[in-house]
Image (spheres, grey):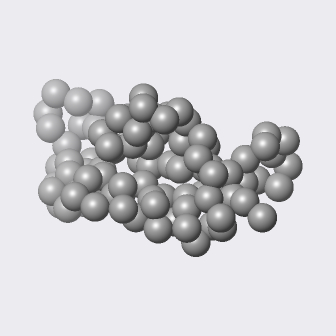
Amino acid sequence: MSYVVEVKQSARKANGAVGRLVNREGSRRTFPDRRAAEAWADGLSEGSRPVWIRAAHPADRSEVDGYLVSRRRQALALDGAYDKRRRRLRDTTPPPDTLGQFR
């Protein structure tokens, strides 16, 4: 039995090695099983943005068993993010030039 993987656009854009591979060999790869496909994805992720194998949905009518996918953006660190709620809780007096002064 073989396991067919299609490379999705998210993986091509996020990981340069994947993009080069698709240019040379096409967007579909066949493996003996899912474990081999996952090992291939792990190898592509080393030193680069991670990619992984995602199983195709059971209702998916394509001829593939899984997809190589990635996220285009890295997870954002929100620790120092501007938060309106936090500011409102800290400062209870509204600025004089806003509608909040008419409460």
Res. 60 image quadrant: top right
Note whether 74 is above or below 23 in the view shown.
below
From this viewpoint, is residue 20 visible? yes
User: Closer to the camera, 5 or 91?
Assistant: 5
Q: What residue do we see at 29% from left, 30% from top?
A: 99
Report the number of discs: 0
| Left or right: where 75 falls relative to 27 | left
User: Closer to the camera, 17 or 98?
Assistant: 17
Quadrant showing the N terminus: bottom right
User: Closer to the camera, 102 or 2?
Assistant: 2
Q: What residue do we see at 69% from left, 58% from top?
A: 3
| Left or right: where 61 falls relative to 80 | right
Instruction: Report x, y in % for residue 98.
Output: 23, 30
From this viewpoint, is residue 78 visible? no
Instruction: Report x, y in % for residue 26.
Output: 53, 33
User: Closer to the camera, 69 or 73?
Assistant: 69
Instruction: Report x, y in % for residue 22.
Output: 46, 35
Res. 17 image quadrant: top left
Q: What residue do we see at 24% from left, 37% from top?
A: 101
Name the residue furthest bottom: 35
Instruction: Report x, y in % for residue 81.
Output: 20, 52
Note whether 42 is above or below 17 in the view shown.
below
Quadrant showing the C terminus: top left
Q: What residue do we see at 22% from left, 58% from top?
A: 47
